[in-house]
Image (cartoon, rainbow, N blue to C red):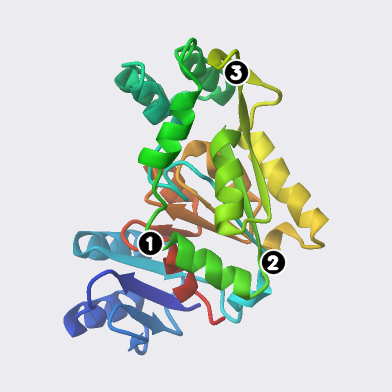
């Protein structure tokens, strides 16, 4: 199985040689200053995983072992979480900042993403309830002033779209943001939660079915069926425990700057490179 190393900075020959030795590969061949590939590494045992983590982590190198023989164009769908994955912020935390409750809401968000709060529905309701009475115009301010795409997002999306892959943004966040990102990024499908707004104010309630871990996984499966693909042809990218179930049904799961519980269960972890690190994992 191929081993891929990638970094934001040039990879040094010494680091490549040490990684090659750890992985018992015959050669680590540079593809560019920042990407190198070994076509034959040792089986990915827990011991090898720990050794690569221990060596690569302090050097800001991301490593991945991927199935041999697959091309990026063999996949049919790229599904992404939104908050802290496709974008750099947690929208609900930034909304809460406008009513002076960012610290309180952020603490609940972090606990939920780490998996410490197992009832996502309850954690979302608790956070949204704190927003009651806030002017809905704040949502537009968060989008305009604070929402930023994660590094590499546009390059990754443009490349996979050019290869014919469909794209899905599925979020435990809010449709106010996914609806604006959909045309901006030419996304094919989106799903998220709806904040109830009455007379221009947030009521503190969520309307309809909450997009929790089960709904995320179901949405990935439904979109795969809709486009005539199998879940094994899906790539799923996420950062929090709410993403684990949809990542588990995918052919490839990518933990993006993720919580430890997510990194431990994902096929691949990007702790340093951008979302376009996906493009280095497979021939196109």
* Residue 23, quarter of the rendered image: bottom left
Q: Position of residue 191 (x, y in %)?
A: 66, 41
Mark 3 and mark 1 lie on one chain; the one further toward the N terminus is: 3
Query: Which residue lies under the disc numbered 2?
Result: 76
Q: Which quadrant would the C terminus be assigned to in this image?
A: bottom right
Alpha carbon separation for disc pair 3 and 2: 36 Å
Q: In the displayed structure, does residue 261 sit left or right of residue 81?
A: left
Q: Position of residue 253 (x, y in %)?
A: 54, 56
Q: Nearer the viewer, mark 3 or mark 2?
A: 3
Query: Which residue lies under the disc numbered 3?
Result: 197
Relative depth, front residue between 41 and 139: 139
Q: Mark 3 Cα within 10 Å, few/some/many (few <14, many 20+)?
A: some
* Secondary structure at numbered mark 2: loop
* Secondary structure at numbered mark 3: strand
Q: In the rendered image of this protein, does residue 112 appear above or below residue 266?
A: above
Mark 3 and mark 2 lie on one chain; the one further toward the N terminus is: 2
Question: What residue is rendered at 69% in x and 62% in y?
Answer: 232
Q: Position of residue 203 (x, y in %)?
A: 56, 12
* Residue 6, quarter of the rendered image: bottom left
User: Residue 274 shows which numbered tag?
Assistant: 1
Alpha carbon separation for disc pair 3 and 1: 35 Å
Mark 1 and mark 2 lie on one chain; the one further toward the N terminus is: 2
Alpha carbon separation for disc pair 1 and 2: 21 Å
User: Can residue 114 be spotted in the picture?
Assistant: no
Q: Position of residue 242 (x, y in %)?
A: 54, 36
Q: Mark 1 Cα within 10 Å, few/some/many (few <14, many 20+)?
A: some
């Amino acid at each position: 199985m191929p081993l891929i190393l990638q970094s934001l900075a040039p990879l040094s020959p010494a680091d490549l040689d040490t990684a090659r030795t750890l992985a018992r590969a015959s050669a680590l061949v540079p593809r560019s200053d920042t990407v190198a590939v070994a076509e034959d590494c040792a089986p990915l045992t827990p011991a090898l995983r720990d050794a690569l983590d221990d060596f690569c982590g302090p050097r800001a190198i991301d490593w991945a072992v991927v199935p041999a023989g697959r091309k990026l164009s063999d996949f049919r769908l790229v599904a992404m979480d939104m908050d802290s994955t496709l974008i750099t912020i947690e929208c609900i935390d930034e909304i809460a900042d406008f009513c002076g409750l960012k610290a309180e809401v952020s603490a609940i968000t972090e606990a939920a993403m780490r998996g410490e709060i197992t009832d996502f529905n309850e954690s979302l309701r608790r956070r949204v309830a704190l927003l009651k009475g806030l002017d809905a115009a704040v949502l537009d301010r968060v989008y305009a002033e604070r929402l930023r795409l994660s590094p590499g997002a546009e390059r990754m999306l443009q490349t996979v779209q050019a290869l014919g892959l469909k794209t899905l943004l599925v979020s435990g966040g809010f449709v106010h943001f996914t609806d604006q990102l959909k045309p901006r990024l030419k996304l094919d499908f989106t799903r998220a939660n709806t904040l109830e707004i009455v007379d221009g104010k947030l009521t503190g309630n969520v309307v309809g079915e909450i997009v929790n871990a089960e709904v995320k996984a179901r949405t990935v499966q439904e979109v795969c069926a809709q486009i005539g693909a199998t879940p094994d042809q899906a790539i799923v990218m996420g950062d929090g425990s709410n993403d684990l179930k949809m990542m588990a049904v995918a052919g490839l799961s990518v933990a993006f700057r993720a919580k430890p519980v997510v990194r431990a269960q994902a096929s691949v972890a990007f702790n340093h490179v951008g979302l376009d690190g996906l493009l280095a994992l497979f021939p196109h």
